[in-house]
Structures are given as structure tokens and as C-alpha cells.
Amino acid sequence: MPPPRTKHRPLLLATTFLSLLLLLSLLSAAHRAFAVADDDGHRARVLLAGDGERNADADHAAAVDRHCAGTLHRDVCVSTLSTIPNLAQKPLRDVISVVVGRAASAVRASSSNCTSYLLRPRQLRMRDRLALSDCLELFGHTLDLLGKAAAELSAGNSTAEESVAGVQTVLSAAMTNQYTCLDGFAGPSASEDGRVRPYIQGRIYHVAHLVSNSLAMVRRLPQRQRGRSLRANEPLEGYGRVRRGFPSWVSASDRRRLQQQGGGGGVAADVVVAKDGSGKFTTVSEAVAAAPNNSETRYVIYIKAGGYFENVEVGSEKTNIMFVGDGMWKTVIKASRNVVDNSTTFRSATLAVVGTGFLARDITVENAAGPSKHQAVALRVNADLSAFYRCSFAGYQDTLYAHSLRQFYRDCDIYGTVDFIFGDAAVVLQNCNLYARRPDPNQKNVFTAQGREDPNQNTGIAIQGCKVAAAADLVPVQANFSSYLGRPWKTYSRTVFMQSKIDSLIHPRGWLEWNGSFALDTLYYAEYMNRGDGANTSARVSWPGYHVLTDATDAANFTVLNFVQGDLWLNSSSFPYILGLS
């Protein structure tokens, strides 16, 4: 029998239906709640990511500002660093390495540009072709220098003073190379239509500006400060007394070679050059060509007495070469290239030295072009760690082209008229005789024309313990010509005369303008404890950049020890030198 019907069943169904509706409503609300929560979480994640990106951008911008502070070409710096990933996390050395790498890429582009122009069928004047060839050579040297800088920076030796000084040295030279390229298009025989230099200079300036920014950053690398003013007899830790000492880059065997008395006959030479056929070669160029490439040991070329009429180049691959002659004016290398006859100044050198570690002793190098031929170089040196002892260099305008890198001259005689010691090396001349010759009518004698383009280059000319005098041909007519210690070839020209004997030929003003007020407030010219009739500083120029030094600490910045780090390399040369002040 079926269960009895009841009157409460409709109510039960209604209650069940309402319960289902409530459950569905709760589920729907829960779904909406989870959806909203998920959407809010997504938005939160997006907001957090956006904040992170904004923070990263801010950190990157702050790093750009920090690294570009103090650079001379900020727009180039900002555009360069803005594209470096994770800049804020990179140490300064790595940042500089990136900029150096960008400079190398720019050099390759500039080289390609010059090559394409040189190969164009249009007529180029001989001087322009030579200038473009100079540029290509200089670009090749620049890539080598930038490679050395990158290697030193990647070594991670962040506190060693010699490491930082080495980077400054090669970067300074890399910059000098760019301006030397452009200098080749100036002068009496340069192209008058102006088509060559404007075509190439934009890329070259870009390289120079990248290198300039690198130099500014390098100055902020931590380094050990020497801060010492060595006297002649003061012992230098690790090297003993320096009265008859040598910088450490000169080996003991080289020291013996360089200190031997008399001619080169007593030197154990690897090869002999003799005009009379008694040696293996009759020309110096043949002997250089036969020398080993990239030698890590000293290779000695003995050049017997005689006149060798040739232009000699010691290329970058010819490292650690040494020339030994039979004495000044006995062994003579002589030529006469000059700017008037369509050479560039860079290419005019009788002897051009590029290979690192070059030494020379007891020889004369002469450019016999004469005063009317304008720029005519006897010796050009763009070789690092190069030294010359008991040598003479004779010419008129631009005799000694101390082009770049670290150089040292001891007991040498230098003859010339206009700007006859010039260039942008870090160079110390010690115990040398500097002789002004008789110039052409209406010319003035100027002993130095230093070529520093950037305040962060560690370059300049330091003349210590030398004699500044008139040559025999000038003495009778000395009153007819004015002679000056120097003039500013480039914006940050830097030259110091210290502890030297300055004769009466020097004009009371001491220094000469280059062109009006150019560089007078940016140059650095100084005199320290000089003597002689021309050493009185009371009537000297009043330029902002001229200084009379009275503090030995200031003068010590331009000694062999501090200016060319001579304690690290001269010892192997066997040439005598004084590390500090005498």
C-alpha cells in the first residue's frame, strides 16, 4: 500500500528550490570573488614589475651620470653608456673596457673610410695621399694601443699604480694618433680645396672623444700614490741609490752595454753595419729589416763610423732593438725629407722609431733640409719605453719629434730653430745640451712646442739639468733673433724647465704665444730652480697657465720617477739617470 499523501510536500519542494538558488548564488559570488582577487593579484604583479623596471631605469640613468661626470664630451659619453646592459652593476674597469672597445670599432670604421677615399679614382695630390697613408698607419698603431689598454683593464689589477699609468699612457697615445692624422692635412703643400679633411675628420674626432672619455674615467681608478720627491742620492726601495742608477726597465745586460766607454766596437753586437763592407750590411735599413720580429730580448745593431744617407724606420714589430754607434758625429744617419717638398711632418723623419723598448747610444741623426724647408724631422719616436744616451739630433724646424708614449734622453745634444723639441710624449730630457741655431730672417727660435690635446693625458716635456744655449752659428748674431723656451702647439700644452742652465739668448718674457690668446689659460708651463743669465723670471709672461715653482713636491711630478715611471723600465737600458730631483 502506498504511503499516505501529506499536505507538507509543496513546502518541501519550495524550500529545496530556494536552497539550490542560494547555493548557486554563493558559488557565483565565490567565483566572482576569486576572479576579482586573481585580477587584483595580476594588477599587483604588473605594478610590482613596473616599479622594478622604473627602478632599474633610474639606476641605469644614475650610473650614466656618475660615470660621465668629469668627461669632456658628455653627449658622446651618455650615448655610449646608455646602451650598455646592466651598467649599474658593472665595475668601473669593465665600463672603461666597453668604451675602449667602442673606440676600437670606431677606429676600424675610420680606417675603412680613409682607405675608400685613398682608392677613389679622383686625382689626389701627393701630399694628400701621404697624409692618408699616415692616417692608416696611425690607425693600425691605435688598434694595438687600445688592445693593450683593454688587456690591462681586464687583468683586474685595480690598485697597481703602474697598471693605471700604463693604461693612461696607451690611451694618451691613441688620442695623439688621431690628431696627428689630421695634422697631416695642414701646411704649405696641403690640399687647398678642403675636400679631404672634412670627409674624414668627423669619424676621427669621434674616436678621439671616446678615448678622451676613457681617460677621464681612468683617472677615477684607485691607485697607489707615490707622493715622493727623490733626491739624487736617496735610496729607492728595491733599487738602491740612484746617483748612478737606472730605471728598472733597463736590464743589467743592457746597463752594461750602455755604460761601456768609447765606441760601439766593445759591444757584443748581433749584427754590424759598415759603409766599407766590413760588416754584414752596408745600410742601417737592411740591418733593421733582418732583425727578429717581436723579440723579447735585446737585439744589438752596431753601426760603424760613417755617413749613412737613408731614411730608417724601426717598425712596431721590431721590438727591443738597440743602435750602438762609434760616437756623436762619427756615426751619422742623415736625410732631408721636408714639408715644402711634399712630405708630411710625420713622414719626414730621418729615423722613425715605433718598436717598443728601443735604445740608441753614440750616434747622430740629422735632417739636412735647411731652415727654409720648414718642418723637417731628424728623429721621430712613438715607441714606448725608449731611451737615448750620448746621441745628437740635428735639424732646424721640428728636429726632435717626441711623438707619444714614454721616452728618456740622457747626455744628448739637440740642435734646431723653430719648435725643435715637440710632440705629445711623456718625455724627460736629462743632462742634455739644447742648442738654438741661426734661423731664417724674420724667424724666432722656439725650443719646445708640446702637443697635449686633453687635460687627462699624462704627457708633457720635462727638461731637467740641461743647458739651454746658442749654437756656434747663432752666437755672433744672437742679438738679431729672439729665442723662447716654448709656445703652445695644442690646447693643454705642458712643459717644465727645472734645475737647468739657461743662457742669455732667452727673451726676458721666456715664452711665446702660438696665436693670440690661444691656450694661454689651459697650458701648463713652469720653471723650477734654473740658473744662468736667461733664468730670471721677474719679467716672464703673466699667463694664467704659467708658473714659477717653489715647492720641490710640485717639481717632483715631472721627474723620471713620477713622470715616465722610469724606475719600472730604465734599469734595463744601462743608461745613467736620476730618478728624482738633483
Image: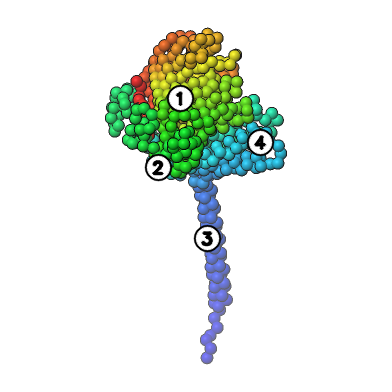
Q: Mark 3 near mark 4, Cβ–Cβ under 8 Å? A: no
| Quadrant containing the C terminus in the rendered view | top left
Q: Which mark is residue 34?
A: 3
Distance of label 4 from label 2 (alpha carbons): 41 Å
Q: Amino acid at mark 1?
A: Trp
> Which numbered disc, 4 or 2, marks the residue that appears first in the sequence?
4
Q: Position of residue 537 (x, y in %)?
A: 45, 11
Please give left or right for residue 121 compared with residue 262 in the image. Answer: right
Point out the frontmost of discs 3 and 4: 4
- Between 191 and 441, the residue placed more toward the observer is 441
Q: Amino acid at mark 3?
A: Phe
**Extreme residue in the bottom direction:** 1
User: Mark 3, residues whose alpha carbon is within 10 Å: few (<14), some, or many (≥20)?
Assistant: few
Please give left or right for residue 79 compared with residue 471 in the image. Answer: right
Distance of label 2 from label 1 (alpha carbons): 31 Å
Q: Secondary structure at mark 2?
A: loop
Which residue is the site of mark 2? 296
User: Mark 4, residues whose alpha carbon is within 10 Å: few (<14), some, or many (≥20)?
Assistant: few
Q: Name which residue lies at 69% across and 28% down.
A: 192
- Between 489 and 339, the residue placed more toward the observer is 339
Which residue is the site of mark 4? 199
Point out the frontmost of discs 2 and 1: 1
Q: Name which residue lies at 56% across and 67% down.
A: 24
Q: Secondary structure at mark 1?
A: loop
> Which numbered disc, 4 or 1, marks the residue that appears first in the sequence?
4
Q: Secondary structure at mark 4?
A: helix
Q: How is the image coloured?
A: rainbow
